């Protein structure tokens, strides 16, 4: 029993170590300096158009983790929400990019854009306004 418990603890630690730290980014030209996760979820769930959201690829691990952390929703729930918004003409879904580098490039080029990337991909072309736990 003790060995099983030790194995479970080590497994949990390894999973936490492998999880990427996600940051929400904006262009250097954007005046925003920080944001709460509840605010970020508003932009990525179509509830506000103050910022233009830039999304990671559908099905990517970082996308799934991001929506779980900021909105407590899984990929299917987010997709269903956007389908309803698009169908009713209330919003246009975020443009998707295949990786951190492309998201960062798109956000850096648009002062109204907001995106999320792995913290390790941050450089001086963008500004971090939220770090997700």
Image (spheres, rainbow, N blue to C red):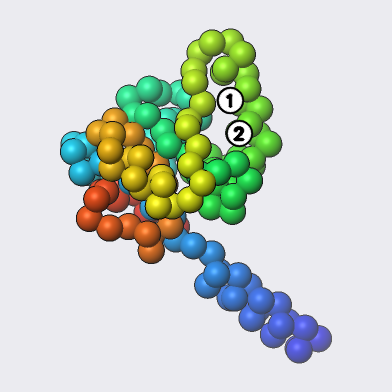
- Count numbered badges in the picture: 2
If the image is split into quadrants, where does the N terminus sit? bottom right
User: With 32 as the anchor, is 6 left or right in this view?
Assistant: right
| Residue nearest the viewer, comparing 27 with 80 | 27
User: With 79 as the anchor, is 53 left or right in this view?
Assistant: left
Q: Residue furthest right?
A: 1
Report the residue marked by disc 2: 78
The answer to whether residue 60 of the structure is visible from this angle is yes
Q: On the image, which quarter does residue 58 sit in?
A: top right
The percent position of residue 132, horizontal first and vertical second, equals 42, 53
Q: Residue at x 76, y 88 (%)?
A: 2
Marks 1/2: CA–CA distance: 6 Å
Compared with 48, 102 (above or below) is: below
Report the residue marked by disc 1: 82
Compared with 110, 87 (above or below) is: above
- Label 2 crowd bin: few (<14), some (14–19), many (20+), radius 10 Å: some
User: With 98 as the anchor, is 109 left or right in this view?
Assistant: left
């Amino acid at each position: 029993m003790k060995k099983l418990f030790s194995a479970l603890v080590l497994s949990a630690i390894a999973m936490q170590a492998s999880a990427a730290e996600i940051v929400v980014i904006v262009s250097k030209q954007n005046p925003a300096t920080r944001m709460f996760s509840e605010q970020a979820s508003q932009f990525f769930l179509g509830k506000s158009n103050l910022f233009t959201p830039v999304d990671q690829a559908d099905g990517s691990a970082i996308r799934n983790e991001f929506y779980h952390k900021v909105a407590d929703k899984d990929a299917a729930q987010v997709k269903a929400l956007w389908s309803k918004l698009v169908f009713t003409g209330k919003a246009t879904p975020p443009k998707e990019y295949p990786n951190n580098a492309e998201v960062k490039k798109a956000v850096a080029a648009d002062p109204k854009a907001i995106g999320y990337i792995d913290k390790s991909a941050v450089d001086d072309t963008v500004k971090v306004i939220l770090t997700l736990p």
